[in-house]
Image (cartoon, helix red, strand yellow):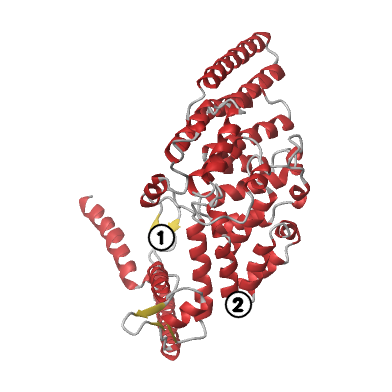
Amino acid sequence: MVTGHDAPYYAKAQQAGHPVVHDLPKFDLDQYIANYRGRTRVDRLLLIGTTAPLLAPEALRAAVIEAKQGTDVGRYDAVLTAIREILPADPNAVPDSAWIDRTNKQVKAESDRLEMELKGYKNNLIKESIRMGYDDQGQHFHRIGDLINSVKAYGRMRDYCTTPSHVVIMNFRLINVSIDQGNWLAVQTNVQKLRSPGQPFAEAQRLTAKLSAAMGLALLASGNYREAALEFIETDPRMVQAKLDDPFDDEAFNEVMTPNDIAVYGGLCALAAMDRNELQNQVLENGKFRSYLELEPHIRRAIAFFVSSKYSACLSILESYRSDYLLDIHLQRHLGELYFQIRSKAIQQYFIPFSRVTFAALAVAFDTDEHTIEQELTRMVKRGHLDARIDLVDHVLLARIVDVRRKVHGNAIKMAEDYERTAHLRILRMEMINAGLEVTEKGKYGGNHTFDDVGVDPFHGVASAGNWLNENVGRSLRSGLRE
């Protein structure tokens, strides 16, 4: 019998560049997935099942059960495909044809009912009923996985919104669908609409935590880690008090992420994009973000170690949670780059006091081997993150020696030359005016024009003035001869 750990699927996935986690994460799968609700539960279970061989059986079976509790047949097919490849002998690998047929009939009947109701509302010309009809349609399409039609329904709903609260509801619906689509530009657009200072969206003020979290997630997905960190660390702490098991709690955003996720996303983005002073002032001393960091104390410790220049301890903490973060649906694609940027900053700070450091010393300081540190240094130098030279013969990292005295002298000479040239041009300008060489020309609409009026720059020297004189005076002489 082929188990998840022995499945050839993971060998093929690794060859294709897909991450495979062979170590058990620190979280318990049941407790972890219980913090979420909605479509993200299936997505997260499916990602864990296709990434972690040791958790695959439990995660994929739970994904099958979760998918069958909804009405998205396409998502059930995706889980079924994964479980057939990874656990072909599992009873859940056999399609439940009865459930598929029954669900398809229910979906069609519900779609027809909503369409008929909407037509009736349009015939009655009641704007509020039409708005609610499009809202119901959008939610229905979202539940069944038809995200394109869901966006269309919410877009048509816009013309029938009569109050600011209706606009807020519509935009939040679009934000949720866009996140499921991975349309991060649409997420940012809808967040900015609600944040627009000229719009009377007072209802959106109590949902600022969701707006910051959604914008931070969109910026993280776009690779803009600094801006993402600024959004996450300014997220209103009211979300921390949300009841995750209450679907009617407006403060909860666990159909997308939990407060723990905000702490992790914000902490990693800040470590990757901010310097030590910013980490101290904007993250550790931030009253808003402190509430989130208390949920993930290891992130707070990692940031504190980085600020204290204890880079090895910081990187050790992050490395111990690598398996957990690789199983996160939003972090997985960015974790390698985030970790590289954090390590790059640490190596830069470590190298500042030295003129040369051996690979062996760096390997000991950052708890790795010489071959890995050589690859990291090469990548950093190529990207311009480290201004140094690599000696591959002696395995030494050499700082570039800058002759400060020569640089200062060069800057002083250049400044003097610029001053001399500017003074010469100013004197030349004054002498031309004193000598009566300031030529004027009758304008097309009357009035006299000097060099300044016609766009001649007096600081470009005699050449520019001469060219202007040759062109304009020559034209006048030729006109006079023809007459």
Residue type at numbered disc 2: Ser
Q: What residue is shown at x 40% (from left), y 58% (from top)? A: 454
Q: What residue is shown at x 21% (from left), y 54% (from top)? A: 481
Q: Is residue 185 visible?
A: no
302 relative position to 417: left or right: right
Residue 30 percent coordinates (x, y): 65, 44
Q: Is residue 288 visible?
A: yes
Residue type at numbered disc 1: Gly
Closer to the camera in the image, 73 or 432: 73
185 relative position to 294: left or right: left
The 10 Å Cα crowd at callout 2, few under 14, some 14 to 19, many 20 or more, is some
Residue 138 percent coordinates (x, y): 61, 25
Dot 1: what SS? loop
Q: What residue is shown at x 54% (from left), y 30% (from top)? A: 147
143 relative position to 198: left or right: left
Q: Is residue 1 above or below residue 96?
A: below
Indicate which disc residue 455 carries: 1
The residue lying furthest to the front in this view is: 1
Residue 376 percent coordinates (x, y): 42, 70
The 10 Å Cα crowd at callout 1, few under 14, some 14 to 19, many 20 or more, is few
Q: Is residue 114 above or below residue 20?
A: above
Q: CA distance from mark 2 to mark 1?
A: 57 Å
Closer to the camera in the image, 130 or 314: 314
- The residue labelled by disc 2 is 309
Label 1 near label 2: C-beta < 8 Å? no
